[in-house]
Image: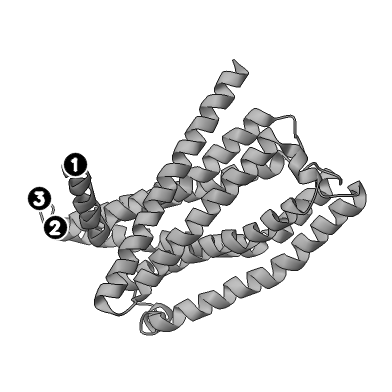
Amino acid sequence: IVSIVEGLLIFIAVSESVLGVLGNGFIGLVNCMDCVKNKKFSMIGFILTGLATSRICLILIVIVDGFIKIFSPDMYSSGHLIDYISYLWIIINPSNIWFATSLSTFYFLKIANFSHHTFLWLKGRINWVLPLLMGSLFISWLFTFPQIVKILSDSKVGNGNATWQLNMPKSEFFTKQILVNVGVLLLFTLFLITCFLLIISLWRHSRRMQLNVTGFQDPSTEAHMKAMKVLISFLILFILHFIGLAIEIACFTMPEKKLLFIFGMMTTVLYPWGHSFILILGNSKLKQASLRALQQVKCC
């Protein structure tokens, strides 16, 4: 029974990965074609393309790393494969969180309606916000690289080679994992703050519109309610993504818990593919392009 459940979870994880690569590849392709057509690259186009590209890389890293640990853990006991995957991870994962944070910040400054002077100052300088956020990404990398190098070095010293098994006390391991992910946690916190403030703004706007319009909802209120549902979906998927990562990290201390590790891998991949399809359905340009693509596939 356990092997059947493991096979089912692996099948779900692979299906999520395929859908994620297709969905994010579609987002990147549409934005690149729009850039070539208009001969200019908008900020939102840059964010969406970078987000899609980083998610494709993230999905591939999670699946390749997971399959190696499940089917051939000995591959991590020879050579420098674990080094390469670890370095790719600390580049791609913060980049993915940074693009998601930039997207939520962009929508927050464009859509939200607050009278606070700090918000108005940022809203008038939206083109400067992205470079400031990029500075936080570089700080995250600078802080993370020495930590991951030390972890890999300690692992080799303790075991004579690289391995994915735990070769240090659990408390020390979790402390180092927290240090490695400090930059990601800060970006994630900023993402949560901007989404929370945007939901408050949209909720306040919806309340005002419902008080002013009786008997029916105007199109603006319906649009804001739809945006609130999309943002809440974003938050749920984002939280599930971090829960999946936490499960995978915890399984380093319990290598015998293969079923739990596969479940964590499946949960981790849920965000990159689910978020991409929410973006397609919530963006009019992407939605129209997807409908045209489906019509062409149907005709073929």
Furthest-front residue in this view: 300
Amino acid type at circle 1 is Lys
| Mark 3 crowdedness (10 Å alpha carbons): few <14, some 14-19, many ≥20 | few
Mark toward the start of the polypeptide (2 vs 1) = 2
Task: Return the residue at label 3.
Answer: 216
Which element type, helix, strand or loop, lies under badge 3?
Answer: loop
Can you tell which mark lies on residue 219?
A: 2
**Residue type of the residue flagged with mark 3:** Phe
> What residue type is disc 2 on?
Pro
Q: Position of residue 94 (x, y in %)?
A: 58, 62
Observer-nearest residue: 110 or 165?
165
Quadrant position of residue 4: top right
Disc 2 crowd rating (10 Å Cα; few below 14, some 14-19, many 20+) is few
Q: Given this view, does label 3 or label 2 mark the residue nearer the observer? A: 2
Q: Give 220 or 146, whichever is nearer the viewer.
A: 146
- Disc 3 and disc 1: Cα gap in Å? 37 Å
The answer for how far apart the CA atoms under marks 3 and 2 are is 10 Å
Task: Answer yes or no: is residue 268 visible.
Answer: yes
**Residue under the image location 30 percent in, 57 percent down:** 203
| Residue lying farthest to the left in this orientation | 215
Q: Nearer the viewer, mark 2 or mark 1?
A: 1
Q: Is residue 208 left or right of residue 266?
A: left
Residue mark closest to the camera, 3 vs 1? 1
Taking the image as drawn, is residue 113 in sight? no
Question: What residue lies at 73% left-to-right and 52% top-to-bottom?
Answer: 81
Quarter of the picture holding the N terminus: top right
Q: Position of residue 123 (x, y in %)?
A: 37, 79
Read off the residue under disc 1.
Answer: 298
Front-most of residues 153 and 25: 25
Q: Secondary structure at mark 1?
A: helix
Q: Residue 145 in the image: x percent, y percent?
A: 72, 66
